[in-house]
């Protein structure tokens, strides 16, 4: 069986997120889905896998169903496949943030950087006055990144604001193009930089995964593979799956890379 994998997120006001947990868990369980979903007052973030029709039913409910009442009508969605079930169980958890930065001024529902589609990304990062910034942790960067990208050298995304305060300057870094796995960390990071007075902040819409899906390998500026937080471990161009042993990682290496 080939499993369909859906990665999704949206920043949206969900003041009733605690009450949404059990209905969402029951809905996913009824579809025999496995994976992880985070709910917070600021929105939703998840990756789940299952039969194709089950994934379609979930995404339809999230975006258009009664459970969220139309509040997830701009859901960022990416689909891929897995040869075996990439998750051991279903988890729906409540969090303070759907991606942890620890900066209340970074609110993507108020202001966010300029989205750059995968097809336009190469031209942006090749411009000589663009600082290309990887917002992921050092483990992920070591596995793969874009040519010439700056590695912030952080262990978790929560350290990004300290890196920005110490290493980035609005007067010197006039144009910043940032990227992450699926786009969610860049939403928070771009909101943080805009709040600090940076003038031009761009981020790759749909993240590395969308780029690897849409941009032909012959035209790609990506080098290496993209680490993902499930049993597939890493994906290459065309979102081709690499296994744990093929990629040369041990289980403890994989667990150490988790960044929530």
Image (cartoon, rainbow, N blue to C red):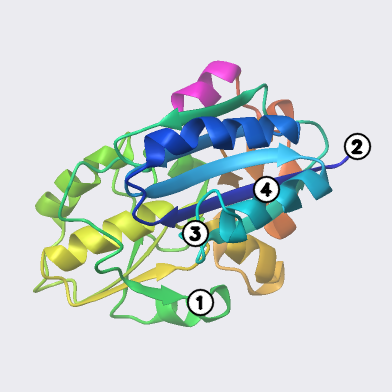
Alpha carbon separation for disc pair 4 and 2: 19 Å
239 left or right, relative to 166? right
Earlier in the chain: of badge 1 and badge 4, it is 4
Residue at which label 2 appears: 1
Between 236 and 45, the one lying in front of the other is 45
Magenta segment's dominant SS is helix
Dividing the picture into quarters, in which one does residue 65 lie?
Answer: bottom right
How dense is the environment of label 1, judged by Cα within 10 Å: few (below 14), some, or many (20 and up)? some
Tag in front: 3 or 2: 3
Q: Residue at x 33, y 49 (%)?
A: 42
Q: Secondary structure at mark 1?
A: helix
How packed mark 3 is, by other alpha carbons closer than 10 Å (few <14, some 14-19, many 20 or more), is many
Q: Residue under label 4, please give it.
A: 58
* Location of the N terminus (image quadrant): top right
User: Residue 242, percent across and down?
Assistant: 72, 39
The reply to whether the C-beta atoms of the residues labelled 1 and 4 are less than 8 Å apart is no
Q: Earlier in the sequence, mark 2 or mark 1?
A: 2
Q: Are marks 2 and 1 in contact (CB under 8 Å)?
A: no
Residue designated by label 3: 72
Please state which of residues 109 and 189 is positioned toward the viewer in this rendering: 109
What span is colored magenta in the figure? 251-260
Disc nearer the start of the sequence (4/2) = 2
Task: Judge from the rendering whether residue 208 lies leftward or rightward of residue 109; answer left or right.
Answer: right
CB atoms at circles 4 and 3 under 8 Å apart? no
Residue for badge 1 = 122
Q: Earlier in the sequence, mark 3 or mark 1?
A: 3
Q: Residue at horizontal 69%, vertical 55%?
A: 79
Q: Cα distance, mark 1 to mark 4?
A: 33 Å
Return the x and y of residue 149 as percentages of the image width and height: 39, 60
Distance between mark 2 and mark 1 Cα atoms: 36 Å
């Amino acid at each position: 069986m080939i499993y369909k994998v859906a990665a999704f997120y949206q920043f949206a006001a969900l003041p009733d997120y605690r009450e949404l947990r059990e209905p969402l868990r029951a809905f996913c369980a009824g579809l025999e889905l496995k994976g992880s979903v985070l709910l917070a007052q600021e929105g939703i973030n998840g990756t789940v896998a299952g039969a194709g029709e089950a994934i379609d039913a979930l995404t339809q409910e999230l975006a258009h169903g009664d459970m969220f009442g139309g509040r997830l009508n701009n859901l960022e969605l990416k689909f891929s496949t897995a040869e075996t079930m990439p998750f051991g169980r279903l988890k729906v958890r409540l969090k303070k943030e759907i991606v942890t930065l620890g900066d209340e001024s970074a609110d993507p529902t108020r202001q966010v950087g300029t989205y750059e589609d995968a097809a336009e990304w190469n031209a942006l990062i090749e411009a000589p006055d663009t600082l290309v910034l990887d917002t992921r942790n050092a483990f992920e960067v070591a596995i793969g990144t874009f040519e010439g990208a700056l590695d912030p050298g952080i262990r978790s995304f929560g350290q990004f604001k300290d890196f920005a305060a110490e290493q980035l300057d609005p007067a010197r870094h006039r144009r910043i193009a940032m990227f992450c796995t699926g786009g969610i960390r860049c939403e928070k990071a771009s909101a943080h930089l805009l709040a600090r007075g940076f003038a031009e902040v761009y981020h790759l819409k749909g993240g590395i995964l969308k780029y690897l899906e849409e941009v032909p390998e012959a035209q790609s500026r990506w080098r290496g593979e993209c680490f993902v937080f499930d049993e597939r471990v890493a994906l290459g161009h065309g979102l081709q799956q690499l296994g744990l042993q093929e990629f040369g990682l041990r289980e403890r290496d994989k667990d150490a890379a988790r960044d929530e």
